[in-house]
Image (spheres, rainbow, N blue to C red):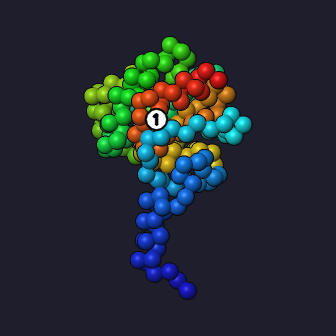
Amino acid sequence: MRAKPHALALVALFAVSGCAGNVGGQPQAGDTRFVAGDGKVTVFPAADRKAAPVVEGATLDGARASVAAHKGKVVVLNFWASWCGPCRAEAPVLKDIYAKTKAGGVEFIGIDFKDRQADALAFERTEQPGYPSIFDQPGKVALSFQGTVPPAAIPSTLIIDEQGRVAARALGAVKYNDLLKAVTQVRDE
């Protein structure tokens, strides 16, 4: 028996809205559902961390950025888009925490996701984050995390530890104290 089109649309709606579980914990391998995020940062125990995939690409200004270029450092990846209201709201938080932690060996890389380059460049001119953003219009960087800890919302923030493992994840706009605490905790391990 074939599923009716409206039944398939309903299933898709529930999948996209994040009604299925495991929102608070570390996702299972292959779990790429997008869920509504509350900005809470979940730090994973060191023994449970998975290696991050290769993250590299052309930046919005035409240079190149990669996690590998910061080997041995903590790297914060923030998945954002200019059309995302919560991304705009969290931009000053990310900028300030980057400025406070850079001297302590923490690097930030933005991942501009599913966006128009002109809009993303305008966003960066306005926000002036101080760190580069990879232009990932097709979403390849986000998809590369399938099987590890996917960024399952826009915005999402992942913290990569000094060993190149996903140490923490926040879904939704991050809160200042929560992100600073998580970045500091991972850096000081």
Residue at 59%, 27% in the rendered image: 186
**60 w.r.t. 104: above or below:** below
Residue at 54%, 15% in the rendered image: 104
Does residue 90 appear left or right of residue 98 in this picture?
left
Tell me if I can see residue 133 in this picture: no
Q: Position of residue 62 (x, y in %)?
A: 41, 28
Residue lying furthest top: 103
Q: Quadrant of residue 120?
A: top left
Does residue 22 appear left or right of residue 179 in this picture?
right
Residue lying furthest bottom: 1
Q: Categorize mark 1 by other alpha carbons within 10 Å: few (<14), some (14-19), many (20+).
A: many
**139 w.r.t. 43: above or below:** below
Quadrant containing the C terminus is top right
**145 w.r.t. 131: above or below:** below
Quadrant containing the N terminus is bottom right
Number of numbered discs overlaid on the protein picture:
1
Tell me if I can see residue 148 in this picture: yes
Q: Residue under circle 1?
A: 78
Q: Position of residue 150 (x, y in %)?
A: 55, 46
User: Is 173 or 105 nearer to us in this picture?
Assistant: 173
Q: Quadrant of residue 38?
A: top left
Q: Position of residue 166 (x, y in %)?
A: 61, 36
The three-letter amino acid code for the residue at tag 1 is Asn
Q: Look at the numbered disc 1 and give the secondary structure of its residue.
A: strand
Residue at 47%, 70% in the rendered image: 11
Q: Position of residue 53 (x, y in %)?
A: 62, 39
User: Is 78 or 181 nearer to us in this picture?
Assistant: 181
Does residue 46 appear left or right of residue 119 in this picture?
right
